[in-house]
Amino acid sequence: MFPGGDMQKLLQQAQQMQTDMMKAQAELAESEVSASAGGGLVTATVTGDGELKGIKIDPQAVDPEDVETLEDLVIAAVQAANDSAKRLAAEKMGPLGDALGGMTGGLGLPGM
């Protein structure tokens, strides 16, 4: 059934890859990335797994007559920070996710 391979060895490799993936996921949750918009007027910070942790707004960005621009800057900063988090996740999880996805046939098995 497993030409040239040993089932026990295959299971051990799968368990090690799952352990490595869980470690990478924990590292992502602890990592933070920031991005700004409007030349640094608004900065958003998110974790590596995409949780919004903070927003910094330069007082120069606050214009009571133009709240829409500030709202747009906040959205842009959050989106840029999330893009950075996705890149970080792809760097950390890419090889592990590809390997596990290939082993499970992309079935989305829990923990894999």
Image (spheres, grey):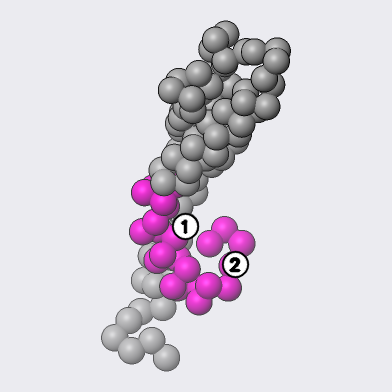
- Compared to 56, does 80 lie above or below? below
- Examine the rendered structure and indicate whether residue 84 appears above or below residue 17: above
Q: Which residue is found at the position 69% from the left and 21% from the top?
A: 67
- What is the number of the mark on residue 18? 1
- Residue 24 showing in the rendered view: no
Residue depicted at 59% across the width and 67% down the height: 108
Instruction: Kindly state the secondary structure of the residue where label 2 is placed.
Output: loop
Front: mark 1 or 2: 2
- Which class describes the residues within 10 Å of circle 2: few (<14), some (14-19), or many (20+)? few
**For residue 91: magenta?**
yes
Amino acid type of the residue that numbered disc 1 sits on in the rendered structure: Gln
Left or right: residue 103 compared with residue 63: left
**Range of the magenta residues?**
89-112
Q: Going by the image, does 101 lie left or right of 54?
A: left
Q: Residue at x 41, y 43 (%)?
A: 88
Residue 92 drawn in magenta? yes
Disc 1 and disc 2: Cα gap in Å?
Answer: 11 Å
> Dot 1: what SS?
helix
- Residue farthest to the left, as pictured: 4
Closest to the observer: 10 or 100?
100
Q: Which residue is mark 2?
A: 109
Query: Where in the figure is residue 42, as x and y percent of width and height?
Result: 53, 21
**Residue drawn at (58%, 22%), measured in percent from left and top?**
55
Label 2 sits on what residue type? Answer: Leu
Side of 27 relative to 73 (left or right): left
Q: Which mark is residue 57?
A: none
Q: Is residue 4 visible?
A: yes
Image coordinates for residue 53, horizontal then vertical, percent: 59, 26
Is most of the magenta stretch helix, strand or loop?
helix
